[in-house]
């Protein structure tokens, strides 16, 4: 007997209903005015928020620099890209600016010093794994967190002779910690399930600000901010023995990494982007939030500019008057984990790459966001190619492809933050082909999207295969064959544990 099996790991999802096509993230989105929701993509289709009328902080907000008259150009210009894999096997996951010229990266290989102006990796020191960084300028000390074990420190008082200090923090008793902040001889540690824990300069535990689920912290003088769930909390630490909660603001998502300069706060929100707050006296003022390409891992502040690393790339946003406004982005070499910025110089921890950029103030442009492919699973089908403008100026796009596919429309203009859908229709089942996009994006004047097919179409018989030991942990040597599950739904899940 021949059985038809649905192997979800190897075939595409169930087809979208008539009038809809498949977005790159797997959602079904309306095509060309058809379907009951023809006004546009669904709310979860990746459409960027409208930042043309952001929240106004009013008289209570921090004074902000007027928005420049933007000049068309490339917002982030790469100045170096150093491969750290072969020589150092260094996996960068966080970055921290010491000054306008120097930055420190940390990761699986230990830590590295980068010259952001010259674009050179000055030093790599193999050692204990690093996960997060915090700088205390009063002590000229960098704290390096390992997430699960001791937080150790570096003495950076001599830029030519950075050494590991004798100080350390044992870390919270159990569980993982997510973020570090330091200033004026104190360190603040965000811990899952154990709140924000304050330590002195020799690593002695002092107190806990919140015994909840802290995931991001910032510390400047006697002010601390803590991202706890979907709230941002402002604390007064002028009396270190008796902290006072000053204000609490809602976040439009679960808070993560925090950047805090004493007057402004950035909070990474994962897939929800980045939230921006002003600090005026004892109050937090919500400035709104902006979207990113992927899911925010890290944020950084440099004056009126905000920076984010979001797995697939790096974003620059204006957070002065009239902001927040995304100005543009740069794609990741591998994985955008960490970012640091000072004086217009930017350093990134890009997995096995250390990359530096120069950001010229006052420059902006359109930024095209496009998936790498359009995926077909049935002949004579239509699928959605969803394009978005992640920049601050209008984006113009024209599209061409081979004779086996039709495009409607074959050109479009997108305002900042706008998303558009091009319907790609296959004539029968043609060979895979390239869709060429010509744009006015300064750093991506042309890019390609592949129109391609699955090896197995929906409803077709899947070839039999065998896997062993795919349960984790698997203490047996059992083999699992697809045909053993004839007539059943089979789901394969792949993951990695770090």
Image: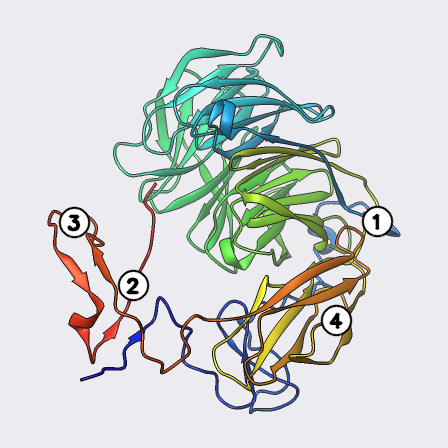
Marked residue nearer the N-terminal end (2 or 3): 3
Residue at 65 percent across and 79 percent down: it is 405
Question: Could you tell me residue 309's position as x and y percent?
Answer: 58, 45
Question: Could you tell me residue 116's position as x and y percent?
Answer: 69, 27
Marked residue nearer the N-terminal end (4 or 3): 4
Q: Are marks 4 and 1 in contact (CB under 8 Å)?
A: no
Q: Which residue is mark 1?
A: 73
Question: Could you tell me residue 70's position as x and y percent?
Answer: 86, 52
Residue at 57 percent across and 28 percent down: it is 221
User: Which disc number belongs to residue 109?
Assistant: none
Marked residue nearer the N-terminal end (4 or 1): 1
Q: Which residue is mark 4?
A: 399
Question: Could you tell me residue 474's position as x and y percent?
Answer: 16, 49
- Above or below for 425 versus 97: below
Mark-to-mark CA distance, 2 and 3: 15 Å
- In the visual, does 221 lie left or right of 79? left
Between residue 58 and residue 432, name the one nearer to us. 432
């Amino acid at each position: 007997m021949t059985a038809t099996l649905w192997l979800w790991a190897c075939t595409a999802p169930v087809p979208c209903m008539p009038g809809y096509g498949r977005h790159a993230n797997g959602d079904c989105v309306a095509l060309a005015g058809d379907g009951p929701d023809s006004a546009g993509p669904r709310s979860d289709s990746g459409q960027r928020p409208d930042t043309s009328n952001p929240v106004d902080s009013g008289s209570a907000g921090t004074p902000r620099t007027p928005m420049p008259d933007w000049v068309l150009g490339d917002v982030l210009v790469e100045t170096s890209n150093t491969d750290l894999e072969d020589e150092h096997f260094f996996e960068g996951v966080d970055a921290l600016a010491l000054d306008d010229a120097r930055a420190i990266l940390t990761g699986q290989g230990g830590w590295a010093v980068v010259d952001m102006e010259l674009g050179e990796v000055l030093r790599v020191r193999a050692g204990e794994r690093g996960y997060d960084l915090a700088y205390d300028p009063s002590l000229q000390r960098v704290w390096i967190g390992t997430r699960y074990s001791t937080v150790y420190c570096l003495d950076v008082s001599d830029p030519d002779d950075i050494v590991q200090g004798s100080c350390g923090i044992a870390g919270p008793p159990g569980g993982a910690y997510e973020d570090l902040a330091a200033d004026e001889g104190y360190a603040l540690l965000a811990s899952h399930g154990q709140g924000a824990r304050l330590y002195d300069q020799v690593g002695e535990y002092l107190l806990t600000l919140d015994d909840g689920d802290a995931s991001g912290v910032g510390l400047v003088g006697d002010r601390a901010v803590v991202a706890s769930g979907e709230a941002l909390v402002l604390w007064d630490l002028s009396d270190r023995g008796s902290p006072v909660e000053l204000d609490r603001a809602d976040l439009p998502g679960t808070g993560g990494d925090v950047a805090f300069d004493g007057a402004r706060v950035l909070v990474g929100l994962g897939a929800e982007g980045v939230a921006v707050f002003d600090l005026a006296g004892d109050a937090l003022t919500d400035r709104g939030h902006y979207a990113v390409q992927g899911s925010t891992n890290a944020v950084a502040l440099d004056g009126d500019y905000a920076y984010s690393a979001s797995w697939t790339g790096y974003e620059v946003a204006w957070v002065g008057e009239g902001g927040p406004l995304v100005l543009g982005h740069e794609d990741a070499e591998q994985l955008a984990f960490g970012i640091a910025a000072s004086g217009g110089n930017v350093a990134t921890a890009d997995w096995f790459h250390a990359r530096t950029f120069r950001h010229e103030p006052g420059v902006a442009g359109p930024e095209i966001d496009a998936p790498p492919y359009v995926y077909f699973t049935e002949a004579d089908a239509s699928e959605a190619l969803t394009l978005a403008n992640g920049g601050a100026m209008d984006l113009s796009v024209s599209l061409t492809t081979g004779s086996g596919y039709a495009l409607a429309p074959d050109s479009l203009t997108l305002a900042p933050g706008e998303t558009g859908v091009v319907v790609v229709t296959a004539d029968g089942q043609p060979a895979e082909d390239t869709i060429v996009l010509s744009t006015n994006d300064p750093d991506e004047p042309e890019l390609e999207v592949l129109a391609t097919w699955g090896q197995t179409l929906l409803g077709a018989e899947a070839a039999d295969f065998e896997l062993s030991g795919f349960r984790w942990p698997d203490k047996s040597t059992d083999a699992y064959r697809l045909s053993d599950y004839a007539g059943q739904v089979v789901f394969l899940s792949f993951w990695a544990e770090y």
